[in-house]
Amino acid sequence: MGLLYSKPLEIFNLDFSTEWSPTPKPCPLFRLPFFALLEVFKSLDPIELFILSQCSRKVAHCVHIVGSKKWKLTVYVGSKCIKVNNKYRLFIIETTQKSSWRYDKNLDTWFLEYQSIGNSKLELQYVISQVQTAFKCPVTSFEYNSVNKENLMKFKSCKYLKLSLSLTMHDLDVFMREWKTGSFPNLQYMLIVRNRVRSTGQILGFGKFNLSRRDGRRRLVIDENLSVDCSGGRDIKADNGTKATMQMERVFSDSFELFVWNN
């Protein structure tokens, strides 16, 4: 049973600013002993917890203890949306008015209406940082329609990547050499389509023909809601011993997939 936003949270200033007020309004909830407060947290949904984390230092420092480190964040860059646990959504909307938060409990959706500063990507990065600071959990997947190879190298905390962009065999080779060093420790699966592939290029010494072969089927379980099939390709190993498989052209012509095995 969660908080009803219209009553318990109405005493808080939900403006965009995260600076702590020098004269905060008292709230009986924050006077509870530590363990009693944790029991209250367990009854709240992620959006309610985040709202409270922005209102109290005490809450901000202990929200993650309820297990939020295991939560999943999905970021939809084009629509400026952050989804928590594939259910609760946070949308960032530009406005000419003073920045503020708006919560629609019926939709499990939270809206940040912010005064435009001319850089919506910077605003999204700032909000992602706030959410990660409160919950101590990584972004597990991105949906990003304008990514390039430089951006790709920054997704080091992602577990699942599905991208539509143009990369050459050389670009993929550079990425995979970086992966071998352990720079993407959380990555379990990656799919890239629309590659500009030439048959003369190689990825970690393997040509397109080797990576397109079919020789059996294995299933990679990413989480309880997502699994993908691998039907060939070439097995590789990272410097730390992590095993993976690279495969091309299973999904689309010139598509590239990386499967990172759990054992």
Image (cartoon, rainbow, N blue to C red):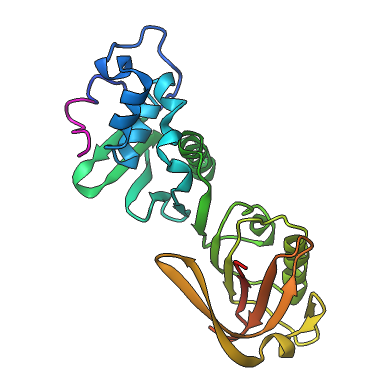
Which quadrant, please, contains the N terminus?
top left
Residue 167 seen by the camera: yes
Q: Which residues are magenta?
A: 1-8
Q: Say whether residue 23 is left or right of residue 69.
A: left
Question: What residue lies at 64% left-to-right and 59% top-to-bottom?
Answer: 152
Residue 77 rendering spot, x and y as whole percentages: 48, 53
Q: Nearer the viewer, residue 210 or 64?
A: 64
User: Hey, which quadrant is residue 33 in on the image?
Assistant: top left
Relative to 249, residue 147 above or below: above
Which quadrant, please, contains the C terminus?
bottom right
Question: What residue lies at 44% left-to-right and 24% top-to-bottom?
Answer: 18
Magenta region, mostly helix, strand or loop? loop
Question: What residue lies at 21% left-to-right and 42% top-to-bottom?
Answer: 105
User: Hey, which quadrant is residue 207 in on the image?
Assistant: bottom right
Relative to 81, residue 114 above or below: above
Count the marks: how many?
A: 0
Residue 24 rendering spot, x and y as whole percentages: 35, 11
Residue 50 rendering spot, x and y as whole percentages: 37, 34
Question: What residue lies at 38% left-to-right and 52% top-to-bottom?
Answer: 85
Residue 96 seen by the camera: no
Q: Nearer the viewer, residue 119 or 135?
A: 135
